Amino acid sequence: MYVHNLEKLFKLNGALWATLQADMKIDAKLSVNWSTVKEWDDSKRYDIVEELEAKAMYEASTEVGSGVMEWIRGRW
């Protein structure tokens, strides 16, 4: 069974989860972005979503300096 729950996936790697927690304490914007991105539901991938929701998800993922994908890439 595949898991698309980001929090569960991050917790599989205790060190990565601890690093994320520490970095979110330092970077409030990363914390806000994580809160947005972790709510992603893979069942929505083919749904039409509101423009604001789509933009919020995109920006939380790609924001320079505090985006979740940038953070992940820096530690992968």
Image (tube, rainbow, N blue to C red):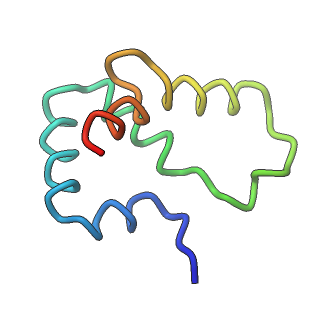
Q: Residue at x 59, y 50 (%)?
A: 40
Q: Residue furthest bottom?
A: 1
Quadrant of the rendering where the C terminus is positioned: top left
Residue 5 point in image, percent of width and height: 49, 64
- Using the image, determine if residue 49 lies above or below residue 18: above
Quadrant of the rendering where the N terminus is positioned: bottom right
- Using the image, determine if residue 48 lies above or below residue 6: above
Q: Is residue 67 left or right of residue 53?
A: left
Q: Residue at x 38, y 68 (%)?
A: 8
Q: Residue at x 17, y 65 (%)?
A: 14
- Could you say which quadrant of the image residue 18 lies in? bottom left
Q: Is residue 29 left or right of residue 3?
A: left
Residue 42 point in image, percent of width and height: 67, 58
Q: Residue at x 15, y 47 (%)?
A: 19
Q: Is residue 13 left or right of residue 38?
A: left
Residue 43 point in image, percent of width and height: 74, 61
- Could you say which quadrant of the image residue 71 lies in? top left
- Could you say which quadrant of the image residue 56 lies in? top right
Using the image as rendered, state which of residue 6 and residue 73 is in the foreground: 73
- Using the image, determine if residue 63 lies above or below residue 75: above
Using the image as rendered, state which of residue 3 and residue 36 is in the foreground: 3
Q: Residue furthest front?
A: 76
Residue 15 point in image, percent of width and height: 14, 58
